[in-house]
Amino acid sequence: MSRIAYVNGRYIRHADAAVHIEDRGYQFGDGIYEVITVINGKLYDCDGHMARLTRSLAEISLDNPLTEDVLMLVMTRLVRMNALKHGTIYLQITRGVARRDHKFPANAKSAIVMTVKHMRLAGRQHEAGVKAIIVDDLRWARRDIKTIQLLPNCLAKQAAAEQGAYEAIMVMPDGSVSEGSSSNVWILTHDNQLVTRPASHDILNGITRQSIEKIAKKRQISVEFRTFDTAEMLAAKEVFVTSATSLATAITQIDEHMIADGKVGEIAHALRADYLASPQ
């Protein structure tokens, strides 16, 4: 069946969906996005995604063209129209169409698009763990805003792909790990403490990350929000990443260094299983 997209109030065949050439998202990356996980036909972590969407829009003074209730109705309908069992919904809001000019247009109308993507929940990479590489973090200073300006992330992800890796883990000038090119990074210390970087302007505070934190606490696993460097990461008992598409995916190799015994750790495996089984 054909994939169906949502474009400014219309449900359209994905192959026919389009926006204007002077949409400010295309011209300037002037927009915000969210990616919502769908598991067994259910939208995951919607409250968190809607709250972050609202915050990101406010940070760049961008209006949401739809209310939250309408957004939910559209996403639910897209799941049904696309027979989406497991996958993601990509939601993007831009400042709309206007003559190309760096300053904000006076009367532009926000534009909104949504697309879906099917995905498999199980696969060899999740059973065996994945490889990551280390790269410099070249992004701007407001990484907490989920903007569509993703060129540095794309460069990092491409570098990983060229080395046969799943993810690129970005490191800041002070030597601390920030996050992955499209994920948050966690380590498990040898005293069984989960560590991930605190939420700030330095990283995007992942919604899946917040859910994994809650699951860890239910399991009575200590979670510490602090910075860590590459040396501590490489020496960790476990390393894993979280995101709407990765869920919780174990990193078993970073560059040429194996993490612990090179196998998926018990904590990463358990947290992923609990997330998949969590009621929504």
Image (tube, rainbow, N blue to C red):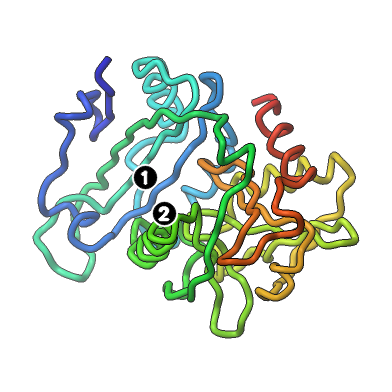
Side (left or right) of 167 relative to 237:
left
Q: Is residue 187 above or below residue 8?
A: below
Side (left or right) of 239 relative to 194:
left
Name the kind of residue labelled 1 in the image: Asn
* Neighbours of disc 2 within 10 Å: few (<14), some (14-19), many (20+): many
Numbered circle sitting on residue 109: none
Residue 58 visible somewhere in the drawing: no
- Indicate the position of residue 111 as horizontal and vertical percent values: 25, 44
Side (left or right) of 211 relative to 158:
right
Residue 203 visible somewhere in the drawing: yes
Q: Along the polypeptide, which appears first: circle 2 or circle 1? A: 2
- Secondary structure at numbered mark 1: loop
Residue that badge 2 annotates: 57
Which quadrant is home to the N terminus?
Answer: top left
- Secondary structure at numbered mark 2: helix
Q: Quadrant of residue 258?
A: bottom right
Numbered circle sitting on residue 64: 1
* Camera-side residue of 185 and 214: 185
- Indicate the position of residue 149 as horizontal and vertical percent values: 34, 61
Residue at 37% x, 67% y: name it.
Answer: 152
Residue at 55% x, 59% y: name it.
Answer: 132
- Rounded to the nearest whole Å, what is the CA distance between mark 2 and mark 1? 7 Å
Q: Is residue 46 above or below residue 220?
A: above
Q: Are marks 2 and 1 in contact (CB under 8 Å)?
A: yes
Q: Quadrant of residue 229?
A: bottom right
- Indicate the position of residue 207 as horizontal and vertical percent values: 59, 46
* Camera-side residue of 34 and 253: 253
Q: Quadrant of residue 156?
A: bottom left
Side (left or right) of 127 relative to 95:
right
